[in-house]
Image: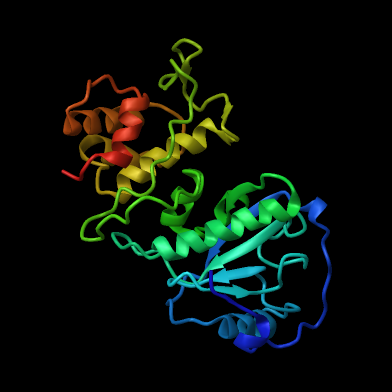
Amino acid sequence: MIIVSRDQWGARAPRSVTKVPPSRRRRFVVHYSAASPDQTPKSIQTYHMDGRGWADIGYNWLVDEHGTIYEGRGWDVLGAHAAGHNTESIGVCFIGRDRPGTVDAGPQARAAVRWLYDQACARTGRTLTRTGHRDIGATACPGDELHAWLHAGMPVDEPTPSPSRPAPGPAVPYPLPAGHYFGPADGPDRSVSGRYRRRFGGRSDRTWLRTWAHQLARRGWSIGTGRRWLTRHGNDGQYGPEYKALISAFQRDQGLRVDGLLGPDTWHAAYRNPVT
């Protein structure tokens, strides 16, 4: 990996430095700058220090589209990237954006972020929780592409899909136990509706159902009656007629068994099947 030190990229001296011991780190938080990849660590530091009044650039590390790693605050310094979670987390920013139908964070960038994650785990002596900024704050950061990749386990050995049409994105594993499915609240215990806010894999059932519906919309699959219902009622993560209609329309489109229930086959098709 190519690592550019603060001196090499011309960082200003921080106004103050607060150290954090490795024993207090629990998370690895990924961000994006939501700007052109031509942005530089120096311009980000200027905005953070002069525009926001922070002591230094907010992130611990930054990565550009070519996979070059830039030292921000470093491993053992308190960042300013995730309000309420800075002490427990190491923040890494992808210098770039997330455009629909375009692979912005390609293999080189992902490999660099994954390398930093592995280094962070080794330095802290534990497996850090992989977190997108949106998981702990009211933001779209780090974009759909990186967020899905994070929760797919940060794979670095998959080919980059063609950006000519909306890319499937990294597959998100089916979150429910064997035999369970997303379905109505008046069904059996294995029917997960979102009404009772049950948690699976560290996230709520409502979050998982919203994630799947968002994947359909991103790929242009929120079709027919399902799309009309979601537009009217919102993607709130509580299974009802709107989700049943959406799931059924998608199942018909994909040649799946049409039952209006979101099980593993229907879930995986959203991430694996070609756009039709």
Q: Residue furthest top?
A: 188
- Compared with 143, 74 (above or below) is below
- Compared with 36, 112 (above or below) is above
* Residue 214 picture location, percent across and down: 38, 45
Residue 259 quadrant? top left
* Residue 103 picture location, percent across and down: 34, 62
Q: Residue furthest front?
A: 1
- Compared with 41, 253 (above or below) is above
Q: How many marks?
A: 0
Q: Is residue 231 visible?
A: no
- Of residue 144 and residue 140, the one placed in the foreground of this image is 144
* Residue 137 picture location, percent across and down: 61, 54
- Of residue 100 and residue 194, the one placed in the foreground of this image is 100
- Of residue 80 and residue 154, the one placed in the foreground of this image is 154
- Compared with 75, 161 (above or below) is above
Q: Is residue 108 visible?
A: yes
Q: Is residue 81 left or right of residue 132?
A: right
Q: Residue at x 32, y 60 (%)?
A: 100
* Residue 79 picture location, percent across and down: 72, 67
Q: Residue at x 79, y 56 (%)?
A: 22
Rendering colour mode: rainbow
The image quadrant where one finds the C terminus is top left
Q: Residue at x 54, y 74 (%)?
A: 2
Q: Is residue 67 left or right of residue 80?
A: left
